Image (spheres, rainbow, N blue to C red):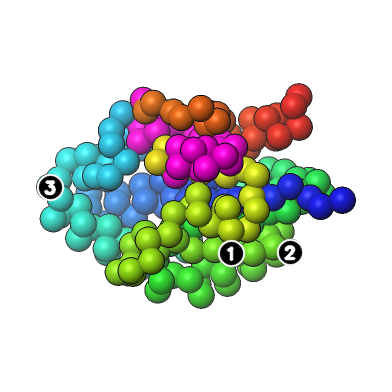
Amino acid sequence: MTKPIIAIDIDDVLSSQVQVLIEFSNENYGTTLTTGDFKAPGEYWGYYEQIWNVGKEEGAQRFQDFLERKIPLRQIIAPETLALLTKLKKDFRLEIVTSRRADYHTATQEWLEKHAPAIFDGVHFVELWDKSDRKVTKAMICQEIGAGYLVDDSVDHCNLAAEAGITALLFGEFGWNIANALSPGVYRVKDWTEVETYLYGK
């Protein structure tokens, strides 16, 4: 019997980008951010500028610094998340679908091999940050690989997936996703326990 496929995002889904961003920001920019600051409602694009209370240009420079120092690779997968993924792998095929940019592809695959060995059957990248003529969405990749589910923290990605007939689980309670209208077929899950509950119908 063919296992259903779950497409899973990395940043703030598989592991916490917010946590390493807080540490980076407080150490380098004199901020006093906490996870509570990331509950404030705001638009997905420009959210970090809102948190930092800076303009678009300064925000872009800080985020570029964050990426160039490879801070996202400091993320860890919580032990309880890894345990749950190991359980899910018995009944589902797990695929990574991420919008990390091209210069992160190899490092991301190495990071996954280190932190989640033998968990994922494939890694797929969306050219969200790269200058590409092929505008690929996560919904398109889900269709290409036959995924029945997408777990992602982005309302836009989840809405597009749902509109393509893919069940989308909108992950987390972040300021950029708590106040948005959802398409039919998008369901909110605050953590991996709720993902498990949804998938197994408990």
Span highlighted in magenta in the image: 157-179
User: Where is mark 3, residue-wise?
Assistant: 55
User: Where is mark 1, residue-wise?
Assistant: 123
The stretch drawn in magenta includes residue 32: no
Q: Nearer the viewer, residue 136 or 129?
A: 136
Q: Residue at x 15, y 54 (%)?
A: 58
Q: Nearer the viewer, residue 194 or 124?
A: 124
Q: Residue at x 33, y 62 (%)?
A: 129
Above or below for 81 versus 195: below
- Of labels 1 and 3, the one closer to you: 1
81 sits to left or right of 188: right
Amino acid on which the number 2 mark rests in the picture = Ala
Q: CA distance from mark 1 to mark 3?
A: 34 Å
User: Where is mark 2, residue-wise?
Assistant: 118
Please provide percent x and percent y for residue 76.
55, 55
Amino acid on which the number 3 mark rests in the picture = Gly
Q: Residue at x 68, y 60 (%)?
A: 120
Q: Quadrant of residue 31?
A: top left
